[in-house]
Image (cartoon, rainbow, N blue to C red):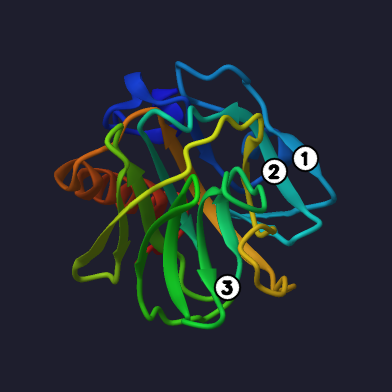
Amino acid sequence: FTKSVGIATPYIEQAVGFWLFGGSEAASVRNWAPNSTTSRATVTGTPVYERGKVALTPVNYLDTGEQLDPQGAFTMIAVCTASLQTYCGTWHSGITDAMLYSTSNTSSLYFAAEGSGSGLGPISFNPGQNLRFIAGTKTVQDVTMVYQHDGTNLLSSSGIAGNRNPSANTYRVGPNGGVGDQLDTTVQYHAANLLFPLALSEAQILEMYDYLKALLAGRGVAML
């Protein structure tokens, strides 16, 4: 593990998901998190594996097999290009949504955590270009935070989640449905993704940003 990432991953001992994409399918589907219930993601379609990233579409995505407790805390982190789409999450239409996504009506980044959450925007949509750091957290008290780093500052916004219903949906990576927008068929690139069953603090989110920026640079990926 250390040979693959170079330095210790912050809070990895608490993670249920850590995926580094690119190079090959075998490398991209592997879950490096010690608390994972599934060691490898399931591939749908034919994603394209490039150096340090994978190209995903609504018909070419990865299902990690990991599940979230809607009534608990969790954190999603993704390094990906912006599109009018879901980036990662449980992808269930309706009140059991739990995902990071962008919407066409506001051009904003959102984090939905079981029905409602928080938004941040507008963001610059530049498909296939800038890989950006984004994250969302939910506490057991249903307080949600969404984060985006613009290369200089960490931007954030808060909200309150609701309608915490049980969900058997598994955590997926790549663009797909559930947000009520027309699906954008633009290719979405992903370089890394992490999943935690706890709400990381803003200081911890910044620590993850610094770690991923250094890690991905060594894999040939520039991250905002």
**In x, y percent, where is residue 24?**
70, 42
The reply, left or right, for residue 196 in relation to residue 189 is: left
Q: CA distance from mark 3 to mark 1?
A: 21 Å
The reply, left or right, for residue 126 in relation to residue 201 is: right
Query: Residue placed at 20% from the left, 44% from the top?
Result: 207
Q: Tell me if residue 203 comes above or below residue 3 in the rendering.
A: below
Q: Tell me if residue 86 comes above or below residue 30 in the rendering.
A: below
Classify mark 1: residues with Cα within 10 Å, few (<14), some (14-19) or many (20+).
Answer: some
Q: Do labels 1 and 2 touch, CB within 8 Å?
A: yes
The quarter in which the N terminus is drawn is top left
Q: Nearer the viewer, mark 3 or mark 1?
A: 3
The answer to whether one can see residue 138 in this image is: yes
Query: Residue placed at 72% from the left, 70% from the top?
Result: 183
Q: Which residue is labeled 2 in the image?
A: 62
Q: Which residue is labeled 1 in the image?
A: 43
Q: Which residue is labeled 3 in the image?
A: 83
* Amino acid tagged 2: Leu
Query: Residue placed at 19% from the left, 41% from the top?
Result: 201
**In x, y percent, where is residue 171?**
60, 38
Q: Residue most toward the front?
A: 163
The reply, left or right, for residue 22 in relation to residue 112 is: right
**In x, y percent, where is residue 151?**
27, 70
Q: Name the foreground residue: 211 vs 95.
A: 95
Q: Earlier in the sequence, mark 3 or mark 2?
A: 2
- The local secondary structure at tag 3 comes to loop
* Amino acid tagged 1: Val
The quarter in which the C terminus is drawn is bottom left
Classify mark 3: residues with Cα within 10 Å, few (<14), some (14-19) or many (20+).
Answer: many
* Amino acid tagged 3: Ser
Q: CA distance from mark 1 to mark 2?
A: 5 Å
